[in-house]
């Protein structure tokens, strides 16, 4: 029963994970001003060259529809590694069909080309529920929690070496770690894997 339920659950997992990967298209490095300092004045070592405080950066499509938003308490750009670190990060992604995915973490770290996004501390990715539409059944809320999530956008992989909790509606699964490859459609849950499936409500 648990195995069958997990196989059904895993069909919906890529929606959550790809929502996280979609958030990886947000690169504040491209939107923030770059300081033009003489070489002699540039800081040496792992020191930030600019800051942003209490910021919000939004991206819109050609019709003016909101695609993504990144908010944070403070962001720091490190020129030696060309990375951006964000405190109390909150990211939102909205698909053309209105599907909303939200990711939050105590700290987020992204590299310059957007190929890697790391979420540290209270990392939560959720896809809000979708009502039923003609030809499409209703989809319950999905949630993905861990102290660490690492997304590789180019290879469409998400991994974590920390305990993870996956929730779909009232069903819940936990594991000691995971590795998801969207291209190969392979999900690996490591360590102690447990699942709790709630019985469906019978229709009259």
Image: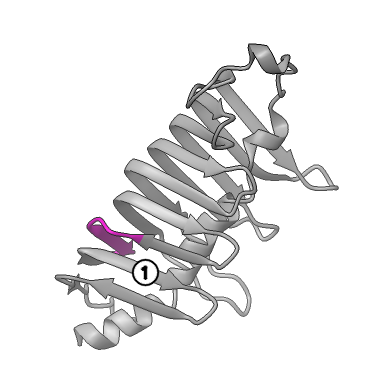
The total number of labels drawn is: 1
Visible residue check, residue 168: yes
Farthest residue, direction right? 62
Q: Quadrant of the N terminus?
A: bottom left
- Can residue 163 be found in the magenta stretch? yes
Q: Is residue 27 left or right of residue 128?
A: right
Q: Residue at x 58, y 54 (%)?
A: 115
CA neighbours of label 1 inside 10 A, class few (<14), some (14 to 19), many (20+): some
Q: Is residue 73 left or right of residue 121?
A: right
Mark 1 sits on what residue?
Answer: 179
Near-viewer residue (165 or 110): 110
- The span shown in magenta is 160-170
Colour setting:
one colour
Residue at the extreme front: 40
Residue 161 in percent (x, y) is at 28, 59
Residue 64 or residue 103, whichever sits in front: 103
In the picture, which quadrant includes the C terminus? Answer: bottom left
């Amino acid at each position: 029963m648990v195995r069958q339920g997990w196989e059904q659950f895993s069909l919906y997992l890529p929606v959550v994970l790809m929502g996280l990967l979609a958030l990886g298209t947000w690169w504040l490095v491209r939107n923030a001003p770059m300081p033009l300092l003489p070489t002699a004045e540039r800081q040496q070592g792992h020191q930030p060259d600019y800051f942003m405080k209490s910021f919000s950066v939004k991206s819109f499509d050609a019709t003016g529809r909101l695609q993504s938003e990144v908010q944070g308490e403070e962001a720091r750009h490190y020129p030696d590694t060309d990375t951006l670190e964000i405190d109390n990060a909150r990211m939102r992604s909205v698909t053309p069909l209105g599907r909303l995915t939200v990711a939050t973490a105590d700290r987020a770290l992204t590299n310059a080309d957007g190929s890697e996004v790391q979420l540290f501390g209270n990392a939560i990715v959720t896809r809000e529920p979708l009502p039923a539409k003609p030809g499409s059944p209703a989809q319950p809320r999905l949630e993905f929690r861990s102290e660490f999530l690492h997304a590789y956008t180019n290879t469409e992989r998400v991994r974590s070496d920390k305990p993870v909790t996956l929730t779909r509606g009232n069903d819940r699964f936990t594991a000691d770690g995971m590795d998801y490859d969207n291209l190969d459609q392979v999900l690996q849950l490591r360590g102690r894997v447990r699942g709790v499936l709630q019985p469906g409500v019978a229709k009259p």
